[in-house]
Structures are given as C-alpha cells and as structure tokens.
C-alpha cells in the first residue's frame, strides 16, 4: 500500500535522516544519496533505502581499509524482475552496468543461490556484490585493461562472502563443502567464472582467504600481483575473445 509523501517525509526525519531523499511527484519512488552527492538511490520504501545505505557503507569501509577511497559515482535502483531478461546484462539477482554507471537490484529472485532460500540477508549480500563491482571499477580508474573481467568477478564474490552475516556464510560454505580453492591463479579465467557461479563464488572466497584476504585483493588492485594470462586450449580467431 502506498503511503502519502508527507508521511514518508516525517518518518525519515524521525529516523534521523539516514540519507537525504527527495519525493518524486505522483510516484511512490523516492531518491536518496546516502550521504554521497555522486550516489543516487531510487527506492520505494525505507527498507530498501536502509539496505542500500548500509551496503554502501560496508563497501566503502572495506575498500578504505585497503587504502582505497572510493567515490560511488553510480545510480542504484530497486526493480521488479522484467518478464524477459537481456542476455549478458541481467543476472538472477541484479547487475552493474559500468557503461551507464548503474546498478539494478531485483527485489526477488526466481532461483536459489547455493540452494538457499531467498531472504533479505541474501539479497543484501548480492547488493554488496554489485557495489563491489562498482568499487573495483573506480579503483582501476575505469580502465578495462587493468584487470580482466573474471578477476572483477573473483573480487566481487570474495567481498560478498567476506561481508556476509556469519551464519549465512556458514550455510553457503556448507552447501558447497566439496569446492576447493583454486590451485593456481591461472584457474581463475573466463570459463571457470561463467560455468557455475555458485561454485566459482566459493572457490574465489576460499582462494581469497588462502592468499591473504584483503592484502591479496589490494595487491591485485595495485598491480603488484598480475594474474597470469589464460592460454586457450583451442585455436581462436582475432576478435573471438575479449579481454574484458
């Protein structure tokens, strides 16, 4: 049930103005910036706004802890799942469109990642995943050549699981107990990152822990560790394979 805009405004003021928001005339959607002028959230209710701001705080603090100040130059909106999804753009849970500087988070999922039921905690973890993509993109100065796509995915999953509520993370790891860490960094490639996201996520997290956690990610982002080039086991023509 939609609330009157005046009531919404009073509720936000009473909650301590967690983020400034501006009512949209004639629409239930509202806007906020979570205290960052270059961050724009489009949301329907207070729960969505709180989820966005808390997730953004977690991500900016995580990267600050590694020595990176991230300015979130992106818009984020919560959306119902479209009836038809564009191949390569929309995932089961949401996506980061770096060309448009936009994150879209779906309010519900029609799949069960790691075989777990969809909950607000799980949804929040995938929001952090997309915000981690945004943060990595900012840290590498929006340079596609700095880090291959699979390593963006590796870091986003590692951060997602690291920031998960502990009991939820335990459930994820228990559901994929047979998954091991990658034996070497060459195993992180465009094939392993796309074949089974649930498996790749856990393998990425276990490798992240084994390699030193945030120190390992910081070295990747600074270029102090350069992932080995992937050798394709079959002939490819120019233009068939993209580095990003």
Image (cartoon, helix red, strand yellow):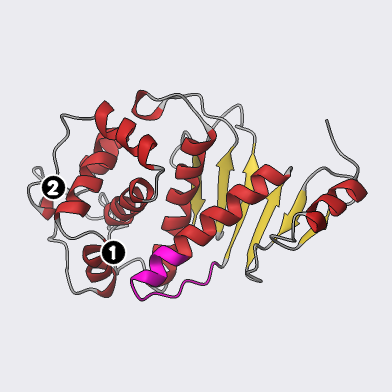
Q: Is residue 223 above or below residue 47?
A: below
**Alpha-carbon neighbours of circle 1 within 10 Å: few (<14), some, or many (≥20)?**
some
Name the disc covering residue 94, or none.
Answer: none
Q: Is residue 143 left or right of residue 229?
A: right
Name the disc covering residue 147, or none.
Answer: 1
SS state under label 2: helix
Quick check: marks 2 and 1 in contact, CB under 8 Å?
no
Work out whether residue 99 can be spotted. Answer: no
Work out whether residue 133 can be spotted. Answer: yes
Which quarter of the rendering shows the N terminus? top right
Image location of residue 210, percent across then percent down? 14, 53
How much space separates mark 2 and mark 1, taking CA atoms? 15 Å
Which quarter of the rendering shows the C terminus? bottom left
Query: Magenta residues?
Result: 61-72
Image location of residue 93, percent across then percent down? 49, 37
Specify the quadrant of the image occupied by residue 72: bottom right
**Alpha-carbon neighbours of circle 2 within 10 Å: few (<14), some, or many (≥20)?**
some
Residue at 13% over, 47% down: 187
SS state under label 1: loop
Image location of residue 103, percent across then percent down? 55, 52
Residue at 50% over, 24% down: 110
Tell me if residue 89 is in the magenta stretch: no
Q: Is residue 4 left or right of residue 134?
A: right
Number of labelled discs?
2
Q: Is residue 126 left or right of residue 236?
A: right
Q: Who comes first in sequence, dot 2 or dot 1?
A: 1
Q: According to the image, label 2 marks what residue?
A: 187
Q: Is residue 227 above or below residue 89?
A: below
Q: Is residue 222 above or below residue 89?
A: below
Residue at 7% over, 47% down: 183
């Amino acid at each position: 049930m939609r609330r009157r805009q005046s009531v919404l405004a009073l509720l936000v003021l009473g909650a301590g103005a967690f983020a400034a928001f501006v009512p949209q005339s004639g629409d239930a959607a509202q806007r906020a910036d979570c205290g960052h002028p270059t961050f724009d959230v489009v949301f329907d209710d207070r729960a969505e706004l709180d989820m966005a701001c808390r997730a953004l705080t977690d991500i900016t603090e995580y990267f600050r802890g590694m020595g990176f100040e991230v300015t979130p130059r992106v818009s984020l909106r919560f959306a119902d799942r479209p009836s038809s999804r564009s191949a390569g753009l929309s995932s089961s849970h949401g996506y980061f469109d770096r060309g448009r500087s936009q994150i879209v988070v779906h309010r519900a999922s029609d799949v069960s990642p790691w075989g777990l039921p969809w909950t607000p905690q799980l949804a929040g973890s995938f929001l952090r995943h997309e915000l981690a993509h945004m943060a990595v993109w900012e840290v590498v100065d929006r340079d596609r050549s700095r880090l291959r796509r699979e390593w963006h995915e590796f870091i986003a999953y590692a951060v997602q699981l690291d920031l998960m509520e502990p009991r939820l993370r335990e459930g994820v790891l228990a559901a994929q107990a047979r998954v091991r860490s990658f034996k070497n960094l060459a195993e992180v490639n465009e094939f392993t990152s796309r074949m089974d996201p649930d498996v790749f996520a856990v393998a990425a997290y276990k490798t992240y822990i084994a390699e030193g956690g945030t120190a390992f990610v910081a070295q990747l982002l600074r270029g102090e560790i350069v992932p080995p080039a992937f050798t394709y086991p079959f002939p490819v023509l120019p233009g068939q394979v993209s580095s990003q």
